[in-house]
Amino acid sequence: MTASKLSRRAILSSGALALGGIAMPSVLRAQSLPEYEPESNVRTTRRNVMGFRNHHWRDHFSNLRRGAILCDTYSRALHYWSEDESIYLAHPCSVPMTEEFTRRGTTEITLLRYQPTWIPTPNMRQRDPSLPERVEGGDPTNPLGTRAMNLGWRYYRIHGIDNPAKIGRRASNGCFGLLNPHVERLYELVQVGTQVRVI
């Protein structure tokens, strides 16, 4: 395999082997995720691998009371630290499509929603009148996926996703979308009051 033909999977798989089986954040277990970009797209592959940034919670939060979530719009990843520091998760996510839809700063989880119903915001319906008025929870086409966590900012959420191809892309109207297995695990760990910071 030449350097120009290295794929994201090859790089990440070799990195995991070099670490001798140490538990890795799920963002590094790319071999278990579907491949949505052509292997020949070297420029995109390199950008996606090199764009990921490691974070330490102390760089963003003064404490871990009720846990903490960091949504990194640059590397398109969500990081979670439990209050006792025993759990750290890093997952790839979808991020807002444009700066207009992006809100940065600190907030918190205000509501946990199991099998949430999706209702487009008034602005979404204005931009696209063909959107349905609502999609019930459990529907595989529901843009909120299987779980949603409302943030303190109106209409902003961390939620599952209806289309895995959106992961790692600018694809949302302001929310952060995770693969459904990832959002389901996060949902079990967070609580109302978990801190959230968007950078």
Image (tube, rainbow, N blue to C red):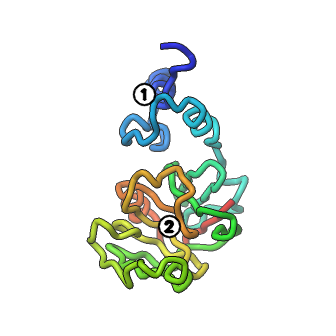
| Mark 2 neighbour class, 10 Å CA radius: few under 14, some 14 to 19, many 20 or more | many
Q: In the displayed structure, would residue 126 be above or below residue 42?
A: below
Residue labelled with disc 2 = 158
| x 49%, y 43%: residue | 27
Q: Amino acid at mark 1?
A: Gly
Q: In the displayed structure, would residue 29 be above or below residue 142?
A: above
How far across and how far down the image is residue 117, in percent? 36, 79
Q: In the displayed structure, would residue 93 be above or below residue 100?
A: above
Q: Nearer the viewer, residue 194 or 126?
A: 126
Q: Nearer the viewer, residue 81 or 170?
A: 170
Within the image, what quadrant is residue 9 found in? top left
Residue labelled with disc 1 = 21
Q: Earlier in the sequence, mark 2 or mark 1?
A: 1
Tell me the quadrant of the picture where the C terminus can be found: bottom right
Kindly indicate whether the residue at mark 1 contacts the one at mark 2 (C-beta within 8 angstroms).
no
Q: Amino acid at mark 2?
A: Ile
| x 49%, y 28%: residue | 40
Q: Is residue 92 left or right of residue 132?
A: right
Q: In the displayed structure, would residue 115 be above or below residue 166?
A: below
How far across and how far down the image is residue 162, in percent? 37, 62
Res. 86 in view: no
How far across and how far down the image is residue 135, in percent? 33, 78
| x 43%, y 60%: residue | 186
